[in-house]
Amino acid sequence: CSEVDDLKAVLMRRPGKEIENFDWQAARFKAPIDPERFRAQHDALAQIYRDHGVTVHYIEEQREDRPNALFCRDLVLMTPEGAIVTRPAMEARRGEERYAAKKLADLGVPIIRTICGDATFEGAMVMWVDRHTAILACGVRTNRSGYEMVESELKRMGVEVHMMQVPYGHAHIDGNLNLASHDVALIHAPQVPYDICDMLKKKGYKLLECPSRNEAKESFAINFVAIKPGLIVMPAGNPRSQELLEKNGIEVIPVEFDEIMKGFGAIHCCTAFLKRG
């Protein structure tokens, strides 16, 4: 129920055969990739987690025609009671969730809901603010049916749900808003609704506006992961955003991630949180 409490365990997918000789345009990548560099950057992130005491669990099995499968945040949403297994909106990603569910079961993680029917929902459409507050987004990756399924589960747990409409042309919350500590958030201001900003301010958050549109949208400055309050790992190549965060008391670990970002995802996308606190 947190984006920033001490990170203890994560679920990831080390890219396998699925990233070799695939149709990068059909998979909605923006350019061809170097598979070995792609894997090396993913390995470097996983090692940073381990160096900070985080247990890294891997989804070992996966379809060989699913090169987006490393973006595990989309496949699982953890809650205080267990996991919600999602249903990706992109047809090119359907079926990945089966293997995420299998790994969760192997680890003994309770699965409290599986998104089904005509619903679509991806895990990066939720941002936890605290135990009793969450932002739940709808847009191209989550339709009304998916929104309502997740909303009902969160409300049953005593969570106040704040709706966020993700703008056209954007996928998830974590490209526009992320939390670096219990009182600092980084936002792409033009794309975060006033009501969400107002709620965060009332919760005591200082909102830092990403100082560069290019860093927000092209080099994924906001797509970071908090390892603990005030310590984040973020994609390298975002000097202005890094400086702004550091001036506001946030320690930043930059990591090269440009090869993986060809898939329109970054560090937060690759990391499904299993345990914090």
Image: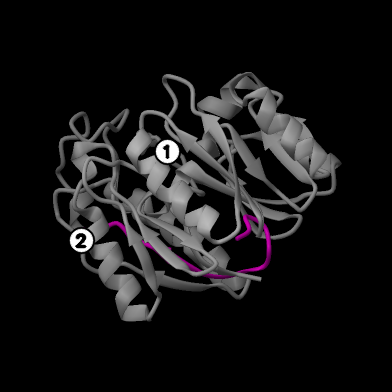
* Quadrant assignment for the N terminus: bottom right
Which of the two discs, 1 and 2, labels the residue nearer the N terminus? 2
Q: Is residue 53 above or below residue 179?
A: below
Residue hosting label 2: 62
Residue 109 higher or lower than 144, as above or below = below
Residue 63 placement, left or right of 140 = left
Q: Which residue is mark 1?
A: 261
Q: Which numbered disc covers residue 274?
A: none
Does residue 4 appear to the left or right of 113 in the view shown?
right
**Identity of the amino acid at label 1?**
Met
Residue 24 at x, y = what percent? Answer: 22, 34
Position of residue 28 relative to residue 133, above or below, is above
Q: Determine if residue 128 is in view.
A: yes
Residue type of the residue flagged with mark 2: Gln
Give the dominant element type of the magenta stretch: helix, strand or loop.
loop
The answer to whether residue 259 shows anywhere in this view is no
Residue at 30% over, 63% down = 100
Mark 2, secondary structure of its residue:
loop
Residues in magenta, as a range: 1-16
Task: Report the front residue among 11 and 120.
Answer: 120
**Gap between marks 1 and 2, in whole Å?**
20 Å
